[in-house]
Image (spheres, grey):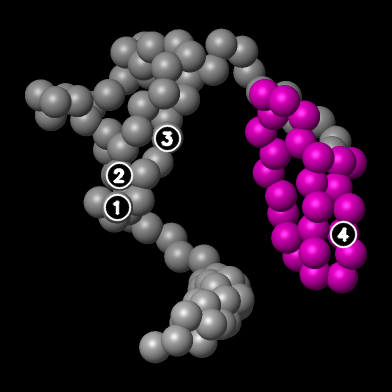
Amino acid sequence: MKRRAFLGSCSLLAGIAPLACAQSAASSEVRSYARTRLVDIHGSPIRYAAIEGETNYVFQYPFAATPCFLLRLAAAVKPASFSGYKLQGLQLSLSIPAKSVVMLELK
């Protein structure tokens, strides 16, 4: 295969890949999964008091390849209004402050 044709094919595939992912994400449905209990290495349920402050815990739920994070923050998180975004058509641009957690609700 000629190098130019190969690079052109790679460019075409690289351009199409995000569209395929966007289509897959847009067609996915929100699903609920069964409740579960987090246990330690001995099989005992993990209690709130046993969770170290400002330590990140990682566990897999609902699938073995899906990492979830459990955090115990030093202080309660208080909701605040957020205006650091710009929406143009279907493109959303965000300016997120440092050490912030932003939850977006898309309608």
Labels 1 and 4: the sequence-earlier one: 1
Please tell me whether mark 3 sits on a helix, a strand or a loop. strand
* 19 left or right, relative to 84: left
Kindly report which numbered mark, 4 or 3, lies closer to the viewer in this rendering: 4
Tag 4–tag 2 contact (CB < 8 Å): no
Q: Amino acid at mark 1?
A: Ala
Q: Residues within 10 Å of mark 2 (few under 14, many from 20)?
A: few
Mark drawn on residue 92: none
Q: Quadrant of residue 96?
A: top right
Labels 4 and 3: the sequence-earlier one: 3
Pointer 2: what residue? Answer: 60
Labels 1 and 2: the sequence-earlier one: 2
Asked if the magenta segment contains residue 9, the reply would be no
Pointer 3: what residue? Answer: 69
Mark drawn on residue 65: 1
Q: Residues within 10 Å of mark 1 (few under 14, many from 20)?
A: few
Tag 1–tag 2 contact (CB < 8 Å): yes
Labels 3 and 2: the sequence-earlier one: 2
Up-down relation of residue 62 to residue 95 (above or below): below
Mark 4–mark 3 distance (CA, rounded to whole Å): 29 Å
Query: In this view of the protein, which residue sits in the foreground, 21 or 70?
Result: 21
Q: Amino acid at mark 2?
A: Gln
Image quadrant for the N terminus?
bottom left
Task: Answer whether residue 30 is visible to the viewer in this image.
Answer: yes
